[in-house]
Image (cartoon, rainbow, N blue to C red):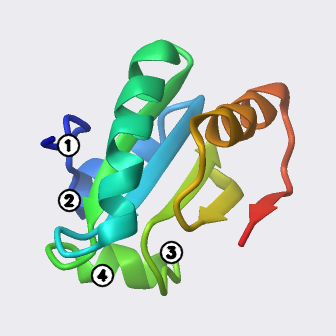
Amino acid sequence: MAHSLPRLDLPALDSLLRTPGVTAVDFTAAWCGPCKTMEPVLDALATEYRGRVRVVAVDVDDEPAIAQRFDVRSMPTLVLVRDGREVGRVVGSRARAFVSGVFDRALAGDVAIAAP
């Protein structure tokens, strides 16, 4: 299944992160098996949370500067940003219900969401 999330470069991501609200940035790579497991989960949640959470993808091989800026060391890593500030991070492949709960926490105002 092809990832249907928008893939962003640094200028597009910077612009998006300055937009008020919650953005989930999926750091992924074409060769990453667990990333492929997360693709349908994030694609479904992007639809379910449309209008509340923006879900985008960054390929770490295509955009290494973004991965370095966010200190991403393994994939998949999902970084949640609300109003320009990182509020959460999930490392590794997770179930849909887990990721949905993380989105809900970010929307509710939590600022310390961590799931290494």
Q: Bin the neighbour count of mark 2 within 10 Å (Cα to Cα): few under 14, some 14-19, many 20 and up.
A: some
**Position of 100 compared to 41: left or right?**
right
Q: Bin the neighbour count of mark 3 within 10 Å (Cα to Cα): few under 14, some 14-19, many 20 and up.
A: few
The location of residue 60, given as percent across then percent down, is: 27, 75
**Cα–Cα span, label 4 and label 2:** 9 Å
Query: Mark 3 or mark 4, which is nearer the start of the sequence?
Result: 4
**Cα–Cα span, label 1 and label 2:** 16 Å
Amino acid at the residue labelled 2: Asp
> Which residue shows up at 71% across the image and 56% down it?
88
> Which residue shows up at 24% across the image and 57% down it?
11
Q: Quadrant of residue 30?
A: bottom left
Q: Would you say the residues marked 3 and 1 are in contact, meaning their CB atoms lie under 8 Å apart? A: no
How many marks on residues?
4
User: Under tag 2, what secondary structure?
Assistant: loop
The location of residue 13, given as percent across then percent down, is: 33, 52
Q: Quadrant of residue 67?
A: bottom left
Q: Would you say the residues marked 1 and 4 are in contact, meaning their CB atoms lie under 8 Å apart? A: no
* Residue with the mark numbered 2: 9
* Residue with the mark numbered 4: 65
**Cα–Cα span, label 1 and label 4:** 21 Å
* Residue with the mark numbered 1: 3
Which numbered disc covers residue 28? none
| Residue 15 in view, yes or no | no
Query: Mark 1 or mark 3, which is nearer the start of the sequence?
Result: 1
Q: Bin the neighbour count of mark 1 within 10 Å (Cα to Cα): few under 14, some 14-19, many 20 and up.
A: some
* Residue with the mark numbered 3: 70
Q: Which one is in front, 50 or 17? A: 50
> Which residue shows up at 64% across the image and 61% down it?
90
